[in-house]
Amino acid sequence: MVTGTELRPSAAPDAAAWDVAATVCDPEIPVLTIEDLGVLRAAHVAPSGRVEVAITPTYSGCPAMDAIRDDVTSALHAAGYDDVAVRLVLSPAWTTDWLSDDGKAKLAQYGIAPPTGKAAAGPVRIGLSVKCPQCSSLNTRELTRFGSTSCKALYVCNDCREPFDYFKVH
C-alpha cells in the first residue's frame, strides 16, 4: 500500500514544501488532511524557487479540488513560497487504498465508517459488512449508494438504529 508518508520527498526543500501542503484539510471532511486522504501525491521545489505540488482527486469530477488547490497555494504562500503551481494528476486514479491508517482512524472518530478491504483490480465486486462507527456492530445495511458526497454511501445500523456515512472502497 502506498501512503502519503511513503511519497514524502527525502530532499529537504521538497520535504519542507510537502509538509506545508500536507497541512491542508479536505473541505468536505475537515478532520482529514489531503495527506491523510492520499490526495497529495508530490511536492518539488525547483532551483528557481518555484514549488510544484501534485494532487489527485478522489473522483475525476470532485468539486473540492478547486478549494484544495486554492488552500494549498495559500498555505505555501503563507510559508514564504512566492511561485506556486498546483497540478491536478488523474492517472493513476485515486483509490481508497491511498487513505492512511491515521486517516481511516480519523474517519471513524468523525462518525464515517472507513473503507473496508482493498480496491478491486478487476470488475469482481463482493459485499462486505460495514462496521457501525457508533456501536461497532456489523449488523448494518446500505440505505443509498450515494451519501452526502459521491465518495460516501449512506448506511444505517440495525442494532443502534443510527444512520452513518460510509467512505466507499474504490
Image (cartoon, rainbow, N blue to C red):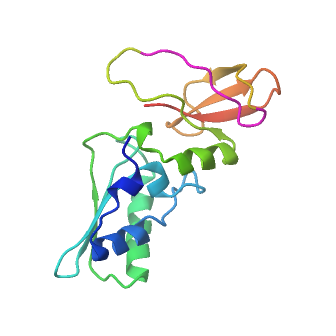
Question: Residue 132 lies in magenta, yes or no?
Answer: yes
User: What residue appears at the point 49 percent right and 67 percent down from the top-left corner?
Assistant: 23
The quadrant of the picture occupied by the C terminus is: top left
Image quadrant occupied by the N terminus: top left
**Vertical side of 138 occupied by 166: above or below:** below
Whether residue 44 is visible here, answered yes or no, is yes
Q: Residue 157, located in which quarter of the rendered image?
A: top right
The reply to whether residue 53 is visible in this rendering is no
Question: Residue 72 location, x and y as percent?
Answer: 40, 67
Residue at position x 68%, y 48% from top? 110
Residue 36, how many percent across, how many down? 49, 53
Number of dots carrying numbers:
0
Please provide percent x and percent y for residue 162: 78, 31
| Left or right of residue 43: residue 130 | right
In this rendering, is residue 13 above or below 69? Answer: below
Residue at 29% across / 71% down in the picture?
14
Which residue extends farthest right?
A: 160
Q: 17 or 74: nearer the eye?
A: 17
- The spot of residue 118 in percent (x, y) is 44, 29
Residue 104 within the magenta-colored segment of the rendering:
no
Q: Nearer the viewer, residue 155 or 40?
A: 40
- Locate residue 164: give its quadrant: top right
Q: Main secondary structure of the magenta part?
A: loop
Q: Where is residue 49, by image quadrant?
A: bottom left
Segment colored magenta: 125-135
